[in-house]
Every structure is written in C-alpha cells, then in structure tokens.
Amino acid sequence: MKAGKRVIVIHVRDDVEKEEFMKELQRLNLPAFIYVHGKLNSLKINIQGTKDEIREAVKKVNEIQKRVHARLYSRGGLYEYSLEDIFRGSQTTVSAQILLKTLELLGAKVLFDGDKLRTSLSWEEILELSGKLGEALSRISLQTTKQIREVAIPVAVAYGLDVEDVLERLVEIGAAEFKEDKFKYELVKNKEQALEELIKTLEGEE
C-alpha cells in the first residue's frame, strides 16, 4: 500500500503531562513511523506509514491522551488509573486486594470495576503508595501466606508501621501464628476478623 503521512498536535498543560505522554508513546509497538517534536504547551506528532498503519497509530495516540488525562486530572475529585499503569509507574506489583484495602484504610475514595481504579489520590500519591506496598511485600513475601499479607501490608503502610512488627502483633493478639514446619506466618482467624482485631488494638494504643 502507498505510504502516507499525518500530523497530529497534542496540547498539554505542563511538563508532567508531556513527560507522561512521552513515556506512554515510547512503549507503543506500532509499524508506523512516529516522530515527535515538543513545544512549550504541545507535542507535534508526525506519523508515517500506510493508511491502515496511520489509522492505528492515531487511535493509539488518542487512547494515550485520554489515559494520561484521566490519571493526571480529576473528575469530580477522582482520578482514574489502570492497575497496570500504577505498577509500571511505581516499578512494583502487589495484589489489587492489598492496594484497595490500603486505600480504604487511608480513608481515600475508591471505585474499582476490576480494571479501572478511580480514587481521590493523585498520580504522585498513588505511585508513592504503591512503592511502599511493594517494599513491604518484598520484606515478608517468603515468610507469609497470601491471606496474612492482605492484612499485614495494608495496615503497616496505612498506619506507618514496620510490616514485620505488624506480623508479630497479629501473633500477639491470637489472630496468626508462625508455622515452624513451613517457616511461614499464617492467619488462624479469617481475614476480616484478624483485620478488625488488629486495627482495634492499634487504635486503642493511640
């Protein structure tokens, strides 16, 4: 097919939006050739390729712009993220359950449909939070089960505590025990009950 060219101008509010847009654009794997010229408040995007390649590239560029806008600028006080974007941006991965429970404990607004997360935390805040969760996970992942991690990590990060101290506290209140044969901490109460008793204990100390 005959090669062609299309030029798109994307308007950006600031350098943060420009940087986020460029990061996303660089991750695209498209057959079309894309060249970007950055100006003060805009990005001039030259797309070269066949008609189909150009159409696909334009579609992807528009999707990127919508995604970047959703996570940088709130609508009704809420920002919108995909979990993939959060974990890629923070260079860490935790379960959705851990992230959502931590947001809940922090008192943040949370709406999650299984794919998109809408919350009152800004992009910088959600990346910082995700990084802290990932750090806590890396410290206890080998010595814990999935269930106890979903209690200990959100509480540790939300209350600013050492995650290993939280594990010990769960044992102290009879909600968990250390299984010598498995070298792992495990809950002996259900997750909701363990969480409730742990928080009650912590708040009673304040």
Image (cartoon, rainbow, N blue to C red):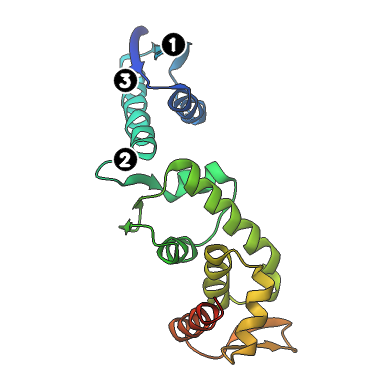
Give the total of numbered labels.
Answer: 3
Tell me the element at label 3. helix
The residue indicated by pointer 2 is: 74
Location of residue 177 in the rendering, given as x and y in whole percent from the top left corner: 65, 89
* Label located before the other in sequence (3 or 1): 1
Give the CA distance from mark 2 to mark 1.
Answer: 23 Å
Q: Is residue 31 left or right of residue 202?
A: left
- Choose mark 2 or mark 3, whichever is in front: 2
Please, is residue 118 above or below residue 18 in the view? below
The residue indicated by pointer 1 is: 40
**Amino acid type indicated by mark 2:** Ser
Residue sitting at x 53%, y 83%: 201
Question: Where is the N terminus found, in terms of image quarters?
Answer: top left
**Mark 2 surroundings within 10 Å by alpha-carbon count, few (fewer than 14), some (14 through 19), many (20 or more):** some
Please, is residue 94 above or below residue 165 in the view? above
Tell me the element at label 1. loop
Residue sitting at x 64%, y 89%: 172
Q: Which mark is residue 52?
A: 3
Give the CA distance from mark 2 to mark 3.
Answer: 34 Å
24 or 171, which is in the foreground?
171
Question: Where is the C terminus found, in terms of image quarters?
Answer: bottom right
**Mark 3 surroundings within 10 Å by alpha-carbon count, few (fewer than 14), some (14 through 19), many (20 or more):** some
Location of residue 42 in the rendering, given as x and y in whole percent from the top left corner: 39, 14
Residue 179 figure quarter: bottom right
Callout 3–callout 1 Cβ contact below 8 Å: no
Location of residue 191 in the rendering, given as x and y in whole percent from the top left corner: 47, 82
46 or 11, which is in the foreground?
11
Give the CA distance from mark 3 to mark 1.
Answer: 31 Å
